[in-house]
Each structure stands twice: as C-alpha cells, then as structure tokens.
C-alpha cells in the first residue's frame, strides 16, 4: 500500500489509487472497473477503522443529499486479506472520485487539488476549442 501522502505515481499525473500498486482492490464487472470503497477510504482517511469511517461517511452523504453516490455502491467479490473472496462494497471510477471529494482528511487534500486542477484544465481546453471553431 502506498504512503498516505504519496497519491501520484512519481513524475506523472497518474493517480496511484487507480494503478496496480495502490493496494486498492479492483474488479472488472460489465466492462467497467470497480474499486473497493473501504480500501479508498482507508488510504485517504488514514483511519485504522476504514469500514466504520466508510459507514459514517455514507450516513453523512445521505444527510447532505448525495443519494447518487450511496445508490451507486454495489457489492462484488474481491480477494480479502485472509485469501478468500468476499463481497465488498465497490464503485465505478466516477463514484470513486465523488467519494474521494467527500473525505474530510488532510490525506485527501492533495488528490482533491489535483482533481480540481484537471477539471480546470479540461474546461480551458473546451473554451479554447469552442473559440477556435468560431473563427
């Protein structure tokens, strides 16, 4: 599992959370990649009780009206630390990014800033492309 403050692959913008060395369990389902919610929460929160933190976060999201995230959490069988396949809360990439945004932890802040920067870059590219089409 990567250090909690090391959220990017060195010298790239690749998120360690989504690569093979992250320690986050992944599973392909219906041609889409799914990630273990507990693993994401554990790395970003720094909590020893990731499952409890995840449950508290789910309640908070529902109270704040973010039903779309809790509604997108499914269960897939993933390899557990004991070597057995067990049902685990899992989300697709879009829902994983939304969960990351909702984690109030200093460990999550560098990733949140990078996601905001990527969003800003994408908006700038769209504005420039629209401006160039108008010429």
Image: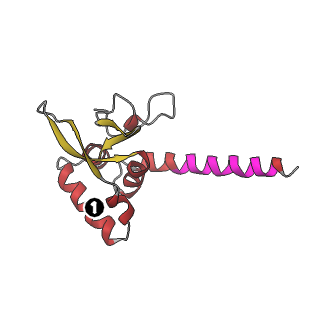
Q: Magenta region: which residues?
A: 116-131
- Asked where in the image residue 77 lies, by quadrant, the reply is top left
Towards the viewer: 78 or 49: 78
Q: Is 102 included in the stretch rendered in magenta?
A: no
- Which residue in the rendered view is the most extreme toward the front? 30
Location of residue 107 in the rendering, given as x and y in whole percent from the top left corner: 35, 47
Q: Secondary structure at mark 1?
A: helix
Q: In percent of the image, x 26 and y 66: which residue is there?
A: 59
Q: Position of residue 30 (x, y in %)?
A: 38, 40
In the displayed structure, would residue 33 be above or below residue 132?
A: above
- Magenta-drawn stretch contains 117: yes
- Name the residue that disc number 1 marks: 58
- Residue 40 position, x and y percent, is 31, 45
Which quadrant of the structure image shows residue 56?
A: bottom left
Q: Confirm whether residue 133 shows in the render.
A: yes
Looking at the image, residue 22 sits to the left or right of residue 10; the answer is: left
Please, what is the dominant secondary structure of the magenta stretch? helix
């Amino acid at each position: 599992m990567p250090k909690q403050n090391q959220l990017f692959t060195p010298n790239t913008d690749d998120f360690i959370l989504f690569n093979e060395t992250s320690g986050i369990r992944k599973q392909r389902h219906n041609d889409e990649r799914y990630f273990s919610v507990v693993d994401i929460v554990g790395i970003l929160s720094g909590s020893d009780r990731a499952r409890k933190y995840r449950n508290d976060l789910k309640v908070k999201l529902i109270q704040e009206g973010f039903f779309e995230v809790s509604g997108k959490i499914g269960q897939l069988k993933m390899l557990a630390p004991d070597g057995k396949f067990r049902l685990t809360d899992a989300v697709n990439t879009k829902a994983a990014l939304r969960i990351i945004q909702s984690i109030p932890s200093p460990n999550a802040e560098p990733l949140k800033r990078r996601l905001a920067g990527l969003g800003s870059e994408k908006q700038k590219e769209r504005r420039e492309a629209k401006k160039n089409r108008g010429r």
